[in-house]
């Protein structure tokens, strides 16, 4: 049920929660949010609920202790606890048993770290009430896979502070629903089907795919990851809007970027800005000379790699992105004439990024090597390759690939977003919703790929 | 009205939800009885019953009989008919009628089903001249498959795609997710003039060998007896359409250990039980049972780990083993 594209979530948990939330008097609404969220988490990962609760209480107490003169050692201490907890569970989950990795830990720990830093910097009020802090850390729209909203955005929620009129409530629910349905459709109608093609390629065996299919696979996996996670983020943001939170932008048309550095400001933006604000800038950012900048970037991308998983491919993935970004910084964007640098930046986004996703996707180094030898077939011709495989799969999957590619164009989504309350879109959205539900009812959907990260 | 103006999408969704829930509630124990367990265990909300039904083409306006896959549902229409009448229907008539009669057979009566029509009649015909002949599996070369047809699911599709020597010689009537129950129902065979069903394809073309591997997709449907009855019907029909062909029943290929251990349906214990029953269908005169698992199994009788990516299908590079097996296990008359 901890999956937004689960029928029980859509038809049981969410409506019941919304009714309960808005029936609760404003004064106690935050409690409804907290208990609803804990219930949600307990259904998904009951065994690891104590870990979440302990982290909430400890973080609240440490922030509370930052009275008057802010203590740096106190901050370091709680940051060490938080980071230690994340690392420990990641190692346990990787090397002992997957079930030991609490759902959403990568996300809620990052929220906690940002909270501690913001309290220390005086950006947020250290005297926030326990109930607010606890609800912020655990809130069900974000606890599983983000977005990593900051505490100051949490406080912008009017529904938790003042009386809201029925028509305001209706408006937030309706608008939240629009984003939710858009995200659901991306996830169910695009990502889940793209996932089938990616799986089919695995079934054939990487040693036996033709080079065109290998490239189609790289594109497919990139699109799958994008619509899976963008879709999830839209659903999460939409649910947030339904209960009064501001819309949190997590994906801002990354594939419209002009460089890889820009791509990662617009891809999973709440994670990128987290790394910027809480690691890159504290290390000195780009203000301490070129060499130090490179070092800082290296740290950020190593941590990003490890955050996604403790396997070699994630480290290679992080380092290769770091390398591309450094190259862009030192040469492409600086030294090349403008039209050429623009061109190279685009090529980086549209060709190098999909290749880095292949590294991201395949954790077995040998299989990864195999895949790249099919992408760039200089070393051999593969085993039992059927040259017709590319056309066959295009024939089957073009109905998913084409809309996915069209949605990469920023203007398409923006066109809808700017006119989303038009009648025609309302009708289309009802149809989209039921198309998703029909598809979900027919087959059990697969959970988000970002679940355990 | 005001709410409709403010929340058109929400209103639309809620209205349809209520409508679907009512439909589901009304037909919960009749039309949708197949899925009701999932609702009662809390796995799916009430309205999902109607949607699950729609996926399986069960609608409130469709009558119960049409949907029959399982024994208790298809009685009625065929009950009173004599076997001979049914056989007539099979030979001529339009496809739908044939199908319902076939399923009617294995369903409606124990007395009718396998016994009368199947083995005895048919093998009897073929046996007549050469009843003493004992056949042994021998090695052949690829040209053996020039007049062969392969009928099967995604695994056979894979064989056609990744075994060039077979694909260039044999005919493949294979389709992903094909089952023994719908092999004669679906129009899945591509021709220049559109898609046709197996019935028509086997009427138009005569083959020397028919290879069948079906049974994995439907392993969760019915029990072994029910499966074997359906299989027998299919064999009979193929025999009628291809009187001179050698029919090879291929044992269902195993799944890998990782899959077999955790799946309550797709496990090798179940596969082995069905294969044992399939082996019984062979008469070793015109119908033979071959089991390619020996060429892909590990020491514990599971599909070898390195041979599959998804625990169910062979990787492209592994199909050669199947091919080799076929080359070494052929009947020459």
Image (cartoon, helix red, strand yellow):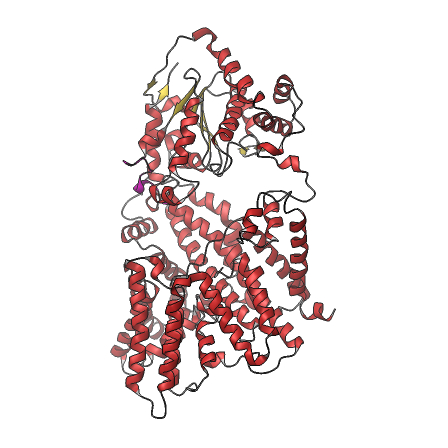
Q: Residue at x 56, y 81 (%)?
A: A27
Q: Is residue B205 visible?
A: no
The image quadrant that residue B146 belongs to is top left
Q: Is residue B17 above or below residue B81?
A: below
The magenta segment is B297-309
Relative image position of residue B23 (x, y in whole percent) = 67, 50
The answer to whether B270 appears left or right of A160 in the picture is left
Image spot of residue A39 (x, y percent): 48, 66
Q: Residue at x 37, y 69 (%)?
A: A51
Residue nearest the observer in this picture, A265 or A17: A17
Q: Residue at x 39, y 59 (%)?
A: A354
Instruction: Specify the farthest residue to the bottom.
Output: A68
Say which of A221 and B131 sits in front.
B131
User: x, y (%) of residue A171?
Assistant: 63, 73
Left of A369 or right of it: where is B50? right
Q: In the rendered structure, does residue B47 fall within the stretch colored magenta?
A: no
Q: Name the image quarter holding the C terminus of chain A.
A: bottom left
Magenta highlight: main SS = loop
Q: Quadrant of residue A278?
A: bottom left
């Amino acid at each position: 049920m901890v999956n937004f594209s689960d029928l029980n979530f859509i038809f049981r948990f969410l409506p019941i929660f919304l009714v309960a939330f808005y029936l609760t008097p404003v004064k106690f609404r935050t409690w409804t949010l907290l208990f609803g969220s804990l219930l949600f988490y307990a259904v998904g990962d009951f065994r690891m609920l104590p870990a979440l609760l302990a982290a909430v209480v400890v973080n609240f107490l440490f922030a509370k202790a930052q009275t008057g003169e802010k203590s740096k050692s106190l901050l370091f201490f709680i940051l060490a606890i938080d980071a230690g907890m994340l690392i420990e569970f990641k190692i346990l989950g990787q090397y002992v048993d997957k079930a030991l990795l609490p759902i959403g830990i990568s996300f809620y720990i990052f929220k906690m770290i940002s909270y501690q830093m913001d309290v220390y910097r005086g950006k947020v009020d250290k005297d926030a009430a326990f109930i607010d802090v606890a609800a912020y850390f655990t809130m069900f729209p974000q606890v599983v896979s983000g977005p990593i909203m900051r505490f100051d955005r949490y406080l912008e929620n009017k529904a938790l502070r003042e009386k809201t009129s029925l028509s305001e409530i209706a408006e937030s629910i309706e608008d939240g629903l629009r984003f939710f349905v858009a995200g659901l459709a991306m996830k169910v109608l695009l990502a889940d089907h793209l996932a089938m093609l990616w799986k089919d390629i695995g079934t054939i065996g990487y040693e036996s795919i033709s080079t065109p299919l290998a490239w189609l696979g790289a594109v497919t996996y990139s699109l799958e990851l994008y619509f899976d996670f963008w879709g999830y983020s839209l659903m999460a943001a939409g649910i947030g809007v339904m209960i009064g939170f501001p819309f949190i932008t997590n994906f801002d048309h990354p594939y419209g970027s002009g460089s890889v550095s820009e791509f990662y400001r617009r891809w999973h933006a709440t994670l990128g800005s987290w790394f910027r604000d809480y690691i890159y800038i504290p290390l000195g950012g780009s203000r301490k000379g070129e060499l130090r900048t490179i070092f800082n970037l290296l740290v950020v991308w190593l941590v990003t790699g490890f955050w996604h998983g403790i396997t070699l491919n994630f480290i290679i993935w992080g380092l290769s992105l770091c390398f591309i970004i450094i190259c862009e910084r030192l040469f492409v964007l600086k030294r090349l004439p403008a039209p050429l640098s623009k061109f190279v930046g685009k090529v980086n986004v549209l060709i190098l990024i999909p290749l880095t996703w292949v590294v991201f996707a395949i954790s077995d180094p040998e299989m990864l090597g195999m895949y790249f030898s099919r992408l760039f077939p200089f070393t051999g011709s593969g085993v039992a390759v059927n040259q017709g495989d590319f056309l066959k799969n295009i024939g089957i999957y073009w109905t998913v690939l084409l809309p996915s590619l069209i949605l990469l164009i920023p203007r398409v989504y923006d066109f809808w977003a700017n006119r989303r309350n038009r009648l025609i879109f309302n009708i289309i959205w009802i149809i989209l919703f039921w198309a998703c539900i029909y598809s979900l009812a027919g087959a059990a959907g697969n959970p988000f790929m970002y679940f355990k990260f | 009205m005001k709410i409709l103006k403010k929340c058109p999408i929400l209103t639309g969704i809620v209205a349809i939800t209520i409508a679907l829930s009512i439909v589901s509630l009304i037909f919960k124990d009749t039309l949708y009885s197949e899925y009701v367990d999932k609702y009662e265990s809390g796995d799916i909300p009430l309205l999902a019953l109607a949607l699950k039904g729609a996926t399986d083409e069960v609608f409130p306006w469709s009558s119960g009989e049409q949907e029959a896959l399982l024994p208790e549902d298809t009685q009625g229409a065929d009950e009173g008919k004599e076997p001979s009448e049914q056989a007539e229907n099979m030979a001529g008539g339009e496809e739908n009628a044939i199908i319902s009669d076939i399923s009617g057979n294995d369903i409606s009566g124990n007395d009718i089903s396998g016994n009368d029509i199947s083995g005895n009649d048919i093998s009897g015909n073929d046996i007549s001249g050469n009843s003493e002949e004992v056949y042994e599996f021998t090695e052949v070369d690829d040209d053996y498959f020039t007049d062969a047809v392969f009928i099967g699911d995604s695994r056979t599709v894979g064989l056609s795609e990744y075994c060039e020597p077979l694909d260039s010689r044999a005919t493949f009537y294979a389709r992903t997710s094909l089952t023994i129950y719908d092999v004669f129902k679906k129009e899945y065979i591509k021709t220049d003039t559109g898609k046709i069903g197996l019935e028509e394809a086997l009427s138009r073309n005569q083959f020397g060998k028919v290879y069948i591997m079906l049974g994995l997709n439907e392993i969760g449907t019915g029990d072994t007896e029910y499966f074997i009855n359906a299989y027998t019907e299919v064999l009979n029909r193929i025999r009628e359409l291809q009187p001179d062909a050698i029919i090879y029943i291929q044992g269902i290929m195993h799944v890998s250990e990782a899959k077999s251990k955790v799946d309550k349906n797709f496990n090798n214990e179940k596969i082995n039980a069905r294969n044992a029953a399939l082996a019984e269908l062979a008469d070793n005169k015109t119908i033979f049972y071959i089991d390619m698992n020996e060429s892909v199994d590990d020491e514990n009788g599971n599909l070898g780990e390195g041979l599959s990516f998804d625990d169910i299908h062979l990787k492209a590079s592994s199909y050669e083993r199947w091919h080799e097996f076929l080359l070494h296990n052929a009947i020459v008359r």
